[in-house]
């Protein structure tokens, strides 16, 4: 694959984005944790001036490795706030409004806040062992793991979920969802659970065109059905359920499959080639869907029109999300391809820089017009994570055990 030579302009851009990212996180930091977006009337009206489970957990990682003393001191604040509002069963809330001491667990049981919270504890301890977050939060971590294991199919070893209950909260992905199971695979690696069973089941169900035919009858039925109705893009399917599956090309879910070790080397190579063919990271990174779900098409749901957000090339249905682009850059860096990682991170930085370093939540996938909230904290944090991955040989996410799996 073509490798782009680093440029002085990219070096300057990356350094400027690093400085701006630190500045934004400092501005959005509160005693309860980092807010999802910069303060403002619109952000308050839409509930973004709160601690979001997935956002705050990802931000905690970026803050802990930022090199900024204030951010490092505040990295665990959001994790503590989320733990304080954990459900008795172990679920981490989707949102905590710290001003009102009120938590929100979303409509259908938001699953990935719990995953990201656990990932943050382990990743921060890996980067800064003296933080000892897994020891500090040992009891809520055990409850969180128990809650997740209750969502796992006892034979497939894949998480099961309702639609619209992960980060793509107005998308129809349900059943066995790539994004959530990529994170689950990483959690299992971090906490010594049966990650290999999850990896194999994900390959057989979510990448059925190249995987061996499953021996387990129920898994085989789902896999054969998916092959009949889906297109082979060289990617994991975004989800498989009993009566449907997603072949829109979940670029972000596939990026996480690489970052979280779910995709072995051969699958990772196919994913890279597929995302390059789709132009998902050019000129800005990352367009989270290769081909949007069409209005009133097979996968369309009426709720996707909520706030006019999820029509084609908008929001989660084909928009460009800079935080996702930065995590794709981190995946490339932790896989050893620093040149490709630099190019992807520069593309994410260019997106953050639009509007005078507005750190917009997302961009339209075709026109690249900014959308969503300005001052999105996880854009800044994900950038810092990827920037570290370019410089540091010790990975935050990949584990030596995963490097042994080449098939």
Image (cartoon, rainbow, N blue to C red):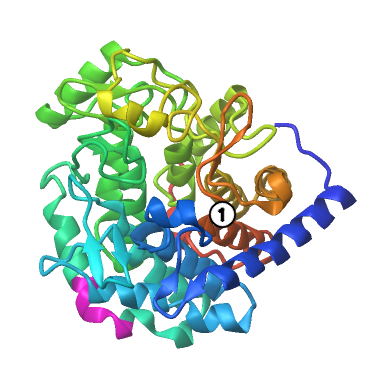
Residue 362, position as x, y percentages in the image: 54, 41
Quadrant where the image shows the N terminus: top right
Q: Position of residue 93 (x, y in %)?
A: 25, 61
Image-based side of 231 in relation to 270, left or right: left
60 vs 212, left or right, is right
Element type at marker 1? Answer: helix
Give the residue furthest to the bottom.
130
Is residue 158 in the magenta section? no
Residue at image x 50%, y 58%? 37
Q: Nearer the viewer, residue 200 or 259?
A: 259
Instruction: Please report the residue visible at 18 percent of the width from the left and 50 percent of the height from the top.
Output: 109
Q: Position of residue 53 (x, y in %)?
A: 34, 61
Name, please, the residue furthest toward the front: 41
- Say which quarter of the image contains residue 389: bottom right
| Membership of 137 in magenta stretch | yes
Q: Which residue is mark 1?
A: 379
Which residue is rendered at x = 56% and y = 30% of the image? 364
Residue positioned 46% across, 35% down in the render: 315
Q: Is residue 188 visible?
A: no
Quadrant location of the C terminus in the rendered image: top left
Magenta range is 135-142
Density class for disc 1 (Cα within 10 Å; few <14, some 14-19, many ≥20) is many
């Amino acid at each position: 694959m073509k490798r782009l030579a680093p440029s002085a302009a990219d070096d300057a851009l990356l350094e400027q984005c690093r400085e701006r990212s630190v500045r934004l996180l400092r501005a959005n930091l509160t005693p309860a944790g980092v807010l999802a977006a910069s303060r403002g009337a619109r952000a308050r009206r839409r509930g973004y001036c709160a601690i979001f489970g997935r956002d705050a957990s990802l931000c905690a990682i970026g803050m802990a490795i930022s090199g900024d003393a204030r951010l490092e001191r505040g990295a665990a604040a959001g994790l503590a706030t989320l733990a304080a509002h954990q459900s008795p069963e172990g679920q981490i809330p989707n949102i905590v409004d710290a001003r009102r001491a009120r938590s929100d667990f979303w409509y259908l049981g938001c699953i990935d806040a719990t995953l990201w919270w656990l990932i943050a504890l382990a990743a921060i301890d890996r980067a800064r062992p003296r933080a000892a977050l897994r020891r500090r939060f040992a009891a809520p971590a055990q409850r969180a793991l128990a809650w997740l294991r209750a969502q796992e199919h006892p034979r497939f070893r894949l998480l099961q979920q309702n639609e619209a209950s992960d980060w793509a909260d107005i998308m129809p992905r349900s059943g066995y969802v790539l994004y959530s199971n990529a994170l689950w695979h990483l959690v299992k690696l971090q906490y010594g659970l049966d990650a290999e069973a999850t990896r194999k089941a994900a390959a057989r169900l979510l990448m059925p065109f190249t995987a061996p035919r499953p021996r387990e009858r129920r898994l085989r039925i789902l896999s054969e059905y998916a092959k009949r109705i889906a297109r082979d893009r060289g990617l994991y399917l975004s989800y498989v359920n009993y009566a449907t599956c997603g072949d829109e090309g979940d670029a972000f879910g596939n990026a996480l499959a690489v970052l979280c070790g779910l995709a072995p080397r051969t699958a990772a190579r196919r994913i890279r080639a597929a995302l390059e063919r789709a132009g998902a990271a050019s000129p800005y990174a990352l367009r989270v869907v290769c081909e949007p779900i069409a209005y009133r098409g097979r996968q369309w749901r009426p709720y996707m029109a909520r706030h006019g957000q999820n029509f084609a090339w908008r929001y989660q249905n084909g928009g460009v999300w800079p935080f996702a682009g930065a995590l794709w850059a981190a995946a490339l860096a932790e896989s050893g391809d620093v040149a490709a990682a630099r190019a992807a991170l520069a593309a994410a930085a260019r997106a953050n820089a639009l509007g005078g370093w507005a750190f917009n939540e997302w961009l339209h996938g075709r026109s690249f017009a900014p959308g969503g909230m300005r001052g999105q904290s996880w854009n800044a944090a994900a950038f810092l994570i990827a920037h570290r991955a370019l410089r540091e040989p010790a990975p935050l996410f990949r584990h030596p055990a995963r490097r042994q799996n080449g098939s």
